[in-house]
Amino acid sequence: MSKHAILNSADHNRLRVRPERSAELGDAVMCCVTFPDEFRNVQNHYPILFQLSPDRDTFTALALFGFENGENLFLDAKGWNARYLPLAIDIQPFLIGLSADADGEKQVHIDMASQRVSHEDGVRLFDDAGQPSPYLEEISAKLGALDVGYQGAADFLSALRDYNLLEPFSLDIELADASKNRLVGFHIINEERLRALDASELGALHRAGHLFPIFMALASLSNLGAMAAQKNLRLNAD
Amino acid sequence: MPTDLPAPIQEVVVADKAALDTLLQGAKEPFVVRGLVADWPLVVAGLSSGREARDYLLARQKDRPFTVSIGPSEARGRIFYDDNMAVNIRSGRTSLREIFGQIDASETHPAQPIVYCGSIDMHAYFEGLHEANHVALGDRNCIASIWMGTPSRIAAHNDFPDNLACVAVGRRRFTLFPPDQFRNLYLGPVDNTPAGRAISMVDFHQPDFEAYPRFRDALAKAQIAELAPGDAIFIPSMWWHHVEGLDPFNVLINYWWRETPRYLGQPQDALNHAMMAIRDLPEQEKHIWRDLFDHFVFANNADVTEHIPEAARGILGPMTVENATKIRSFLLKALNQ
């Protein structure tokens, strides 16, 4: 269970957070939410897929780490093997909190139930004078970027819908041990429909800033091959 | 000619938004509301002329190609099959200005070719059109679409969602039949259709009662209404509707929604799958499956689950989002085998 608290130097002065990456600290996850602003960085390592909400109403963009629940092919005993961590992972155990009045400034919340929260190990959030540590300053900046990114994502995702650019996707992965794995329930950008857009449509997508992330998402799919290879490597190692 | 004219569709007066909302809740019968959207700017423009309505729409279009259906003037607006059972319209993509230019040119001719933009998403193709011309439908999650074109005759078909259709420009005639009349409407193919739904093969302007004798029974159950600009009609889920755009330029705006949760599957998908999986089985096996469908789906009485602990009922339990997601994923995998 999570237990959210508003972060402040009075209550949390001695608090530390363990920033390293491991399964024990909750990093063995199959995917996380991502957004167009970070697609360029994400596509360098991870496939970007889209998923329809269970009520079939809205799409979410996801960075994929594994082919089944609890599998993260980027994570091993030494940590997370990629130069870029998607922000939604990077900011844990912190969250963006809305202040009581809707227009007020957003706050940094922390999930006190997270395994990362500690009093002995890890990085301090405040110095003895109660000033935010460089680590916390960095986290605050990332939370800000995440917040802006999420807000921009809604427009992007509805444009993908308006232009009918998403198609259901399923992937069969045959592994070295001849077992078959199937990934279903995700969508990807339909290349044929993208190619069929005319100059006016491309112009409109470009002006709205959507064209660039569309191509980034397409390019990201080549990472699926590398992930399958990684899964095979792990299979052989077992 | 049939001797009895179809009954008129019930007309209701709604005092305000709340009254419409109440009427729509659980409505099982069609009804017409005269003048529901008479104050829409698009309706007002159209009352001046078709061209004014088109100018109003052009001023609010997004700059992107529209899908348009073009058909021969000999069809006299009837979107149907040709002698070889090929659909008699072809689709293209071009600018709305180009499409409306064709209508400008042919509007005064007695034999207009069919130029028809059907089921265009109001939000994806226009800016501010919906905002200035819409019916408030509460928290219903609607698909809002616009239908624009020359005189047209859309053969009787039905749709799964509930439908509130508002006539914005031109007069439109609706002929409706209750859902159970499908046997008497002589439905055409399911997978070769003008717009995705099976249509009645009967030509309502010249019914061939020798070829389609049961169509008389359908007519006995028919309800009809002619709508003027500003009028609206509620077509309940699965009611058959034959729709005629009667003027040289016609515009309809409609709202589709389902009263049941959106995470449920599409019943038509289940029927299509059953055609593939069950229809061609030996009679005896089909009988077994009919029995199972009755038990698990249609009757779905307490005896399906009462002997299983509640926590262990899985997809036999209430169809929650989680259960629907589970079945969807299972079916996706199974169908791909």
Image: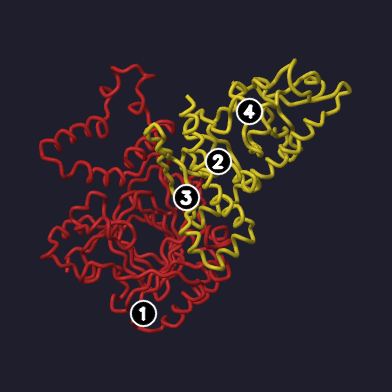
Chain colours: A yellow, B red
Label 3: how many Cα within 10 Å (few below 14, some 14–19, many 20+): some
Chain under label 4?
Answer: A
Q: Please, is residue B290 above or below residue B200 in the view?
A: above
Q: Secondary structure at mark 3?
A: loop
> How far from the left and from the top, in percent, is residue A100?
72, 32
Residue B142 numbered mark, or none: 3
1 and 2 marks in contact (CB < 8 Å): no
Task: Name the side, left or right, on which B212 lies relative to A44.
Answer: left
> How far from the left and from the top, in percent, is residue B287?
14, 36
Which three-letter amino acid code belongs to the residue tagged 3?
Cys
Q: Secondary structure at mark 2?
A: strand
Q: Write the residue at 26% across / 67% down.
A: B86
Chain under label 1?
Answer: B
Which three-letter amino acid code belongs to the residue tagged 2?
Leu
Residues under labels 1 and 2: Cα distance?
50 Å
Residue named by callout 2: A62
Q: Secondary structure at mark 1?
A: loop
Which three-letter amino acid code belongs to the residue tagged 4?
Gly
The N terminus of chain A lies in quadrant: top right
Q: Please, is residue B59 above or below residue B112 in the view?
A: above
Residues under labels 4 and 1: Cα distance?
70 Å
Q: Nearer the observer, disc 4 or disc 1?
A: 4
Chain under label 2?
Answer: A
Residues under labels 4 and 2: Cα distance?
21 Å
Asked if residue B50 can be seen in this view, the reply is: no
Residue named by callout 4: A79
> How far from the left and from the top, in percent, is residue B191?
27, 56
Q: Secondary structure at mark 4?
A: strand
Q: Please, is residue B72 above or below residue B143 in the view?
A: below
